[in-house]
Amino acid sequence: MGSMKHTQLVVVGNGMVGHKFVEALVQQAAPEHLQITVFGEEPRPAYDRVALSSWFAGTTVEELTLPEPGYYERHGVTLFTDEKVDRIDRDTRRIHTTSGRTLAYDTLVLATGSFPFVPPVANGDAAGTFVYRTIDDLEAIAAWASRGGVRAGAVIGGGLLGLEAANALHTLGLDTHVVEFAERLMPVQVDEGGGRALRSRIERLGVSVHTARATSEVVLGPDRSVAGLRFADPAHGDLDVQLVLYSAGIRPRDELARSAGLAVGERGGVVVDDELRTNDPAIYAIGEVALLQGRIYGLVAPGYDMARTLAANLVGALDTEGTTDHRFTGAELSTKLKLLGIDVASFGDSFGKAPGARCLVWDDPVAAVYKKLVVDEATGAVTGGVLVGDASAYATLLSMSRGDLPTPDDPSPLLLPAGSSDSALGAVGVTALADTSTICSCNNVVKGQICSAVADGCHTMADLKATTTAGTGCGGCQPLMKDLLQHELTAAGLDVDTSLCTHFAHTRAELYSLVRFHGHRTFTAVLANHGHPGLTDGCDICKPTIGSILASLGEGYILDGEQSALQDTNDHFLANLQKDGTYSVVPRIPGGEITPNGLITIGEVARDYGLYTKITGGQRIDLFGARVEQLPEIWTRLVDAGFESGHAYGKALRTVKSCVGETWCRYGVQDSVAMAIAVELRYRGLRAPHKIKMAVSGCTRECAEAQSKDVGIIATERGWNLYVGGNGGLRPQHAVLFAEDLDDATLIRYIDRFLMFYIRTADRLERTASWLNKIEGGLDHVRSVVMNDSLGIADELETDMANHVASYECEWKATIESPERVSRFVSFVNAPDAADPHIVFVEERGQIRPARPEEKPPAEVPVLLGAGAGAMP
Amino acid sequence: MSAVTEPLLDLTEPTIAAENRSVSVCAVDLLVPGRGVAALIDGQQVAVFLTEHHGLFAVGNHDPISDTNVLSRGITGSINGEPVVASPIYKQRFSLRTGICLDDPAYAVPVYRIETIDGMVHVHVVS
Ligand code: SRM
Ligand SMILES: Cc1cc2nc3c(=O)[nH]c(=O)nc-3n(C[C@H](O)[C@H](O)[C@H](O)COP(=O)(O)OP(=O)(O)OC[C@H]3O[C@@H](n4cnc5c(N)ncnc54)[C@H](O)[C@@H]3O)c2cc1C
Ligand code: SF4
Ligand code: FES
């Protein structure tokens, strides 16, 4: 099948637009005889450059990467990263790369983007000067900023990107200066009033702004790296900075096109027509390198439009019946940004240049909020505007300026501060939007598409994003999407969806109350009574959730009867699954206290079973690499020596860390180790919506890091201070002081109530920190429930906890005592003694580790044929 | 052909592993409804499930996404009526009927014919 004729399509540049182009080809089912090859000069596949700055806030390169791992391979597209195309030979239709590769093309697409312009200043290339465009740039900036002696940095350029770069320097802890040649910040996007508001907001953050300044020289230090910045006007003294970042605009990377003799614009950019074709009919250009109708589009949305237009044309052209009339018709240049936490937006005719334009202005210098609406005098319609400091009305106003929404007769309330009753969104709702109005400009999704997706069953933002792709670019349209979603759901008589999954309309908290109230003891009973009618089966979301609720309510051994099928695989094997299919073993070490003999036992077990051994971040020891069938034997050894399950696998109490405390430490004021052990033994095995971590410190020096835990206890001269809601992880949050100077009994009572209230009301997979952030009434409410019994449920909460404490048993002890339970721990039912041959270890630093794919023999995967189906037993 | 997106794989017809014999793996009583077990049949690893309401299924035990033999340890359930198992590693769901990954139809696992004969679970394989 398939024709032998391969059309060679070569794409130069694997940036945002180059990637979108490949994606569009794949989505439009590009014909099979199209052979796509992509070259990218950067060492990694395309990533989200728009979100580049989030790298400084901890977003990883993996998260920024646009293609899913394996995407190109899966769709038969060849990608060469770290390989630059350095010459096009148009006569023979070949490209040549820096690694010496030569490839013939039938169609060539240039998506080479642009490069940051470095203004001509003396010593402009000294060590310590940077640009801001790629992940490599950011890594270099972060590395330089962390050098000793680097205290302050200057960004040259106060435009959109310059301010983003300034934010980055600010986050890196540098004294930050922004130097702008023009009279105001963001001269391209905002007007004078907006520039003023922006400047005042930015200065409040401690960033220094210098406008109307020309830079003349980078001052060099003794090691010839940056030691200052000098201005053309000597009246302005030098800036004492050790890092300089240029952000003075972009220039198209048209060097390849230029040397191949393609037409380029006077100020750069590869000239293309509205079908994105250069003056060579076999060569196209898209994205920031393309010069279209005399302009370069330095934003991603128009680039994406170009990518989609070109893909549609190429697929159409290859298709005999297809048409080729897709044209790029220009693009929206509206922007909404959050810079240094400040909302800035400009849209439509933002400078009011059109004839008949009139301006309405709201200027609040105290709050540093500036809003301008441009209104057409004749029609009264909003045609553009600028918003600084409060851009909450952006989406609505943008729709008005596009004519998608009618402008109310009196537009002035549209400028009122957000939240006042007549503010923009209240004045006209999403209902007034036409079905053809663009909601998401990044991905070109209109209102009608979103509404029909909701009608087709997308009832959550996640579904809606996955189905329509709206909201997956800059994210600016998400509030509008959310509004639309809620509106459509309400209109359809559906509640805004808080369902656990497709089987239950309830939230986890509601299910918890229902199970508790009715005393259900099985999943079947819960599903039959509270699930959607007619369903007989759950899923991987509701089963473990209900399993956890039943366990929190003291339903006993979690692997018996029906409960067994509810557990996540970690709970099911009472161990944590690792990437290679083996498990880890974590014995409980209460409070981190362990006897020498205990340590020796763990060491012996690890040695005898060849397990990788590591001290964890939770003051205990993790043994990795156990196969399923080894778990019961290993645990028999540990249980016999007095250890019990550490519940590392469960959404349950994990560890209670301690510091050594008053017993040994010269500053300690209470016995923190004894308290940590007591608390760990009390709450061990307690199943919850998410894991729970605690710590006890013996004095305010806080060596146990209690303020980063769900429950933190810090000794005082008079008792204990109780902290709650701390969290490490992706979004660290400090615990807040809940109550002071408690005696032992009150401390435990408050923790009992706090934990049980959390277990009752939190959502699935919600740590105490996010639960506290969200709960209505906030911390004060939780305090009044726990300390003043404002809901009259304190007794119930305490009884529930007492039940838990009374019914606790070590799950591993209970397992190894029952041959029937042990019999489930095999790799293969029909070969209980066999080990999975696909699990392979290699040695590293004197211990085992899982073999990497290239170190392993391939897995045996059987041949596939046609037809057949399952059978009833 | 016009430029209409077509599914990469036909989602309705199961892809069945070639078979020429049936092997008995365990007593059906041993299976816990809703959970799976793995069987080793001439070097092939097969995940066998007894679902609560759709009966018995057998699919490859190898999870192509994490490259581990773990599907038998996943949670079963149904998504819009389709019986599925969720891989315990990265949670992608595979149809037990067709073997196709619902979260990324580019992946699929083999499906084996399975039946109960005299209380014993039999899987049909080629060897
Ligand atoms: C082993 C250990 C790392 C180590 O080598 O030190 C570890 C290992 C894992 N952590 Fe952790 N975490 C470990 C301490 C921590 C800590 C530090 C601490 O507890 O003091 C944190 C930050 C503190 C916190 O939780 O607030 C931590 C924050 C996480 C998170 C993020 C939680 C969050 O709220 O954002 C996850 C992911 C999750 O739970 O969803 C996670 C998940 C995991 C998982 C379960 C990932 C997984 O699903 O496979 C790892 C299981 C390993 C295993 O098989 O045992 N681990 N993890 C530590 C075990 C402590 C213990 O003795 O039980
Ligand atoms: C910090 C930052 C923030 C931004 N924020 C926004 C925003 O909020 N909104 C917005 O709309 N836009 C924003 N942009 C602009 C947006 O990122 C660009 O418009 C978009 O990336 C353009 O895509 P592109 O594919 O044309 O170029 P690029 O993404 O730059 O990709 C071009 C790629 O081609 C490679 N290349 C060049 N020449 C060759 C060659 N000869 N051989 C092989 N490979 C080559 C380059 O290395 C590069 O990887 C921002 C940009 C930056 C830097
Ligand atoms: S931080 Fe925790 S979850 Fe991440 S790799 Fe380390 S142990 Fe695993
Ligand atoms: S507008 Fe950028 S994601 Fe929708």
Image: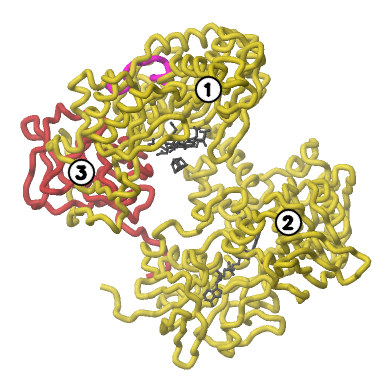
Chain colours: A yellow, B red
Q: Are labels 3 and 1 on one chain?
A: yes
Q: Quadrant of residue B3?
A: bottom left
Residue located beneath label 3 in the image = A836
Per the image, label 1 sits on a secondary structure element best described as loop
Lateral position of residue A362 relative to residue A586, left or right = right
The residues tagged by marks 3 and 1 sit, at their Cα atoms, a distance apart of 43 Å
Per the image, label 3 sits on a secondary structure element best described as loop
Q: Residue A552 lies in magenta, yes or no?
A: yes
Q: Which residues are magenta?
A: A549-561
Camera-side mark, 1 or 2: 1
Lateral position of residue A526 relative to residue A177, left or right = left
- Name the disc covering residue B79, or none: none
| Residue drawn at x 53%, y 30% as measured from the top left | A767
- In the rendered structure, which disc, 3 or 1, sits on the residue that comes first in sequence? 1
Residue located beneath label 1 in the image = A660
The image quadrant where one finds the N terminus of chain A is: bottom left
Q: Is residue A170 above or below residue A122?
A: above
| Residue drawn at x 74%, y 58% as measured from the top left | A153
Q: Is residue A623 above or below residue A702?
A: below
Toward the viewer: A300 or A596? A596
Per the image, label 2 sits on a secondary structure element best described as helix
